[in-house]
Amino acid sequence: MKKAALYVRVSTGHQIDKDSLPHQRKELKNYCKHVLHLDNLEIFEDAGRSGKNTDRPAFQRMMNKIESDEISHVIVYKIDRISRNLVDFSLMYDKFREHRVTFISLNEQFDTSSAIGEAVLKIILVFAELERKLTSERVTDIMLDRASAGLWNGANMPLGYHWDEETKFPSPDEIERKTVELIFNMYDECHSSTIITRYLNDNGIRTKRNGEWTTKTVADIIRNPFYKGTYRYNYRNSPHGKIRPEEEWIVREDNHPAIISKEQWARCNIAMDKNATGKNLPGFEPMKKHIHIFGGICTCGECGSNMHAGKDDKRADGFWPSQYRCASRARKTVCSAKPASDVRIGPFIFKYIVNFLSAYSKRNTLLDVKELENILLDGKEFKNVAYISSSTLNEIFNLLKGRSYNVAYQATSTIKSNHESSSLLDKKRTEVEKYTRALDRLKKAYLFDDDSMSEEEYLSTKRDLEVNLIAAKNKIAELEDDIFNASIDESAFISSASSFILTQKLKSGEVNFKELMLTIDNKVLKDFIRAIVDDIVILKSMPSVITFKNGLVHEFIYKE
């Protein structure tokens, strides 16, 4: 059977007045006994509790029983005993109606089981709604005024920022900002939130609340103008609601320290706009991506992590190099490695390749490893290199001289097989010349010497020679695809005007990395490097070890 709930409350200062707990209990019990004729009662008592909110133990216990349909009536001495906040009262009464609970206030003389009592309560609720709206308007006006003055109105702290108690506003976090910079730098290059999401999750980089990334959270970062120093308020009806008309926004430029430049923020958002609306339209041309020539093949010499690529500062002459940073720094782990730039890496790598080609062309006259080292380190790009490791020099020297014995660093099977292929190729070319001459002599003998052979003998011999000639030519074609990679066969690169120019410059020894970047399609340069270089270890912003695709490992020791 349901029971009547008698709710009584006093604050500390009212313990001895007429609204005291004993007085309330007595009046409520008498009302239930003589007016309502109810004897199944339960008293809920909050002593020394304020009525400004509903955070009261007895009140919460009573509401739980109402939701369990154990209560038929709620009876109070005065309305302010159960709530001094009309908004809270309105919400509470909605719960009463939902569970068919009659509400009675002795002092205000109304009972919601009667028509007049219900009417009085509705009047109270009208004023409660008015209070809600007026309060909301006052709060909104205050918040808009604060935002117009550039003051923080409270919200989830953006990734890359922490609360600054002194300024009372978010301030850049030196650790988290690296993740924000990484996201913008990657999007500047790849224009894909999917690629960035995969990279962040694969490398253990977490969100502000230690969650996994989604394409939505990546896009939210890129779309947020807060990162360029712009404070935008009143943008939506609610945190995830509809966007308000632009004239209702409050926007303050340069309001706080930025993490991303305005130019980069604009580039990324233009690219995202095109991805979202234009990629399926006729005539749409994707934005030209910045090519990171050494992207994806650089390893940190300090900790062994991969190095991610981003844009360096653009120069006045149009030269726009890339910069490579240790990924472990973005994962908030300790690594002291400084970033490396195309400005130093590019000239070093390309000049070294030119020198290597020069050494290859002089392989038959090379006397010793010292002469080889002088050739490889010829140029101002290597002024800080003390020497090349002895294992590297011995390996290169023996490889160039066609020897694979007594080598400090053993060559890989790929290098050995390529060198063997080169020798076999020379042999097969000799065979082609031999069979070609034999066919020529056979034809002359048959045509001009009447007694030399019959027609049947001629055709049979001719067929055998042609079979051998075709077999030798086929073998040559097969071997040419497997020749020593470092020789850089010109046929592998003449696929466009840019690759042809690059090949000619490398062959002639005339190479200027900056000039190459400004005059040659950077994708050709990237493809060229990826075709012959497997990995570059960066130490103190310079190449320390270069591993070529053919397995050769070139190690450089720098001056102290």
Image (tube, rainbow, N blue to C red):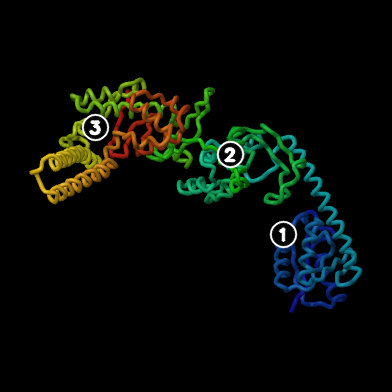
Q: For the C terminus, give its image quadrant.
A: top left
Marks 3 and 1: which is nearer the front? Answer: 3
Q: Secondary structure at mark 1?
A: loop
Q: Amino acid at mark 1?
A: Arg
Residue found 15% across the figure and 41% down from its top: 447
Of the numbered discs 1 and 2, the one sitting upstream in the chain is 1
The residue where tag 2 is placed is 268
Q: Nearer the viewer, residue 37 or 352?
A: 352
Q: Residues within 10 Å of mark 3 (few under 14, many from 20)?
A: many
Q: Residues within 10 Å of mark 2 (few under 14, many from 20)?
A: many
Residue 255, horizontal then vertical, whole percent: 67, 33
Residue 431, horizontal then vertical, whole percent: 17, 40
Q: Amino acid at mark 2?
A: Cys
Q: Nearer the viewer, residue 242 or 300?
A: 242
Residue 287, horizontal then vertical, whole percent: 56, 39
Q: Is residue 256 left or right of residue 31?
A: left
Q: Amino acid at mark 3?
A: Ile
Q: CA distance from mark 3 to mark 1?
A: 83 Å
